[in-house]
Amino acid sequence: MLREDKALKLIEIFITCDDFCNVLTQWQMQQGTLPTIRQGELTDSEMLAITIFYHHSGAKCFQYYYQDWVEAQLRSYFPKLISYERFVARMPRLLPGLFVLLKWLCAQGQRTGFYIVDSKPLAVCDNHRIQANKVFAGLAARGKSSMGWFFGLKAHLVINIYSGDTVPAKTAKVGHGG
């Protein structure tokens, strides 16, 4: 059973994801770009909520989080839960919606002119496997962080120091110096 604060956070995340997915679906219908992919038993908003809530769980491994935490403690919140293998297979289709959701949430932030900027390397493979890498082909590059060299992308986060809101920012390619 979830603690009350965690349960409220999960519900808040789900409501945000569900509202966003409903607005996105309406917009796609108006534009005539609604994907023809059949909706599975677990909705995209439920999958987004589970994926985002992973970062509130404290788990270090997504497989452990899903199999030992979601399936055990969150089944009452998601009665049509699918297996870990099916969940992971469906995850790539969440990526475009997740990026739009993050952009939408960032746009809600208040502009004050006082911000904190931080970045985090998102390694897509070990440095020894760069030549064989196919993940994010053409997009991933070699970069350097305070922890050393990596191959992948770099996420930059701009935070309003007064409200703690994330604000929109430009992105840049990973470079040898960046």
Image (cartoon, helix red, strand yellow):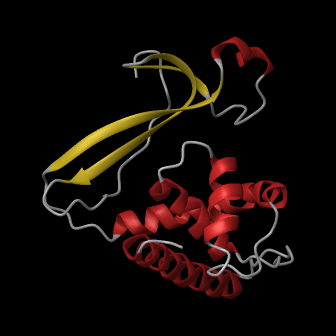
The x, y position of residue 95, in whole percent, is 65, 57
The x, y position of residue 39, in whole percent, is 81, 78
- Would you say 73 lies left or right of 171 here? right
Check the image and report above or below for 78 versus 144. below
The x, y position of residue 45, in whole percent, is 63, 75
The x, y position of residue 49, in whole percent, is 57, 69
Check the image and report above or below for 154 versus 145. below
The quadrant in which residue 47 appears is: bottom right
Depth check, front residue: 145 or 114: 145
Depth check, front residue: 71 or 118: 71
Residue drawn at point x = 70 percent, y = 66 percent:
71
Quadrant where the C terminus sits is top left
Depth check, front residue: 139 or 17: 17
The quadrant in which residue 125 appears is: top right
The quadrant in which residue 37 appears is: bottom right
Check the image and report above or below for 25 versus 62. below
